[in-house]
Image: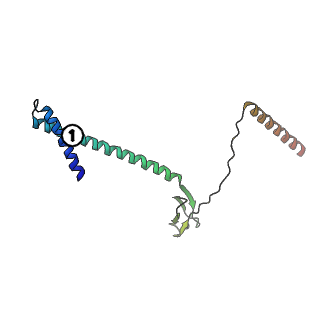
Amino acid sequence: MISIIVSLLITSIISLFFSFGLKDIIGFWQAFSIATGLQIIIALIYKSFRIEQRKSSNITIRSRFDELLALSEVSFKCPCDKFTFTEEVFIGAENIFKCPTCNSNVKAKINLTPILQTDVLSVGANDMQMIIESGIDDTDTGNDLSEKEI
Ligand SMILES: [Zn+2]
């Protein structure tokens, strides 16, 4: 309510400025009505632009959210073996789902297994040659073994 009064006040003040400035050329009230009309048109255009902008940002937020949900989506079989769930599973959530086939509640337990990752060593041209040669050596020994087996 207060913002409406404030914007009406600002609109009329700006219109008054235009009216005083143009009163000798087109008349006081003519200038006042033109200035008010222009301000209303500009405000309407700005408002519709803002609504459009908000709509598009809502769409991007929605699509990001869907991407995030898709990352948590898993498929798993019910213990009754007759139904496969496809659900979003979260570590902090209960993750209990009702099987429509056997009508029982199934809890999806998440096991977290930390696996140590090894770094890939930077391989220079000389190292590459050594790896290739050692590979040839390996096949040689392999051949030796197969020969021994025969
Ligand atoms: Zn089931």
Residue furthest to the top in view is: 25
SS of the residue at dot 1?
A: helix
Q: Residue at x 71, y 35 (%)?
A: 123
Count every numbered label the image shows and give the total: 1
Q: Residues within 10 Å of mark 1 (few under 14, many from 20)?
A: some
- Spot occupied by residue 139 in the image (x, y as percentages of width and height): 82, 39
Q: Please tell me whether residue 83 is drawn above or below residue 50 in the rendered image.
A: below
Is the CB–ligand 1 distance for label 1 below 8 Å? no
Q: Residue at x 33, y 44 (%)?
A: 52
Colour theme: rainbow
Quarter that holds the C terminus: top right
- Residue 40 sits in which quadrant? top left
Residue 141 in view in this figure: yes
Q: Left or right of 145: which side holds 26?
A: left
Which of these two is toward me, 3 or 77? 3
- Spot occupied by residue 82 in the image (x, y as percentages of width and height): 56, 64
Q: Residue at x 42, y 50 (%)?
A: 62
Q: Please tell me whether residue 63 is drawn above or below residue 80 in the rendered image.
A: above
Which of these two is toward me, 97 or 33? 33
Q: Left or right of 81: which side holds 28?
A: left
- Spot occupied by residue 122 in the image (x, y as percentages of width and height): 70, 36
Q: Residue at x 79, y 37 (%)?
A: 135
- Residue 133 sits in which quadrant? top right
Three-letter amino acid code of the residue under disc 1: Gln
Which of these two is toward me, 105 or 24? 24
- Residue 79 sits in which quadrant? bottom right
Residue behind mark 1: 39
Residue 150 in view in this figure: no
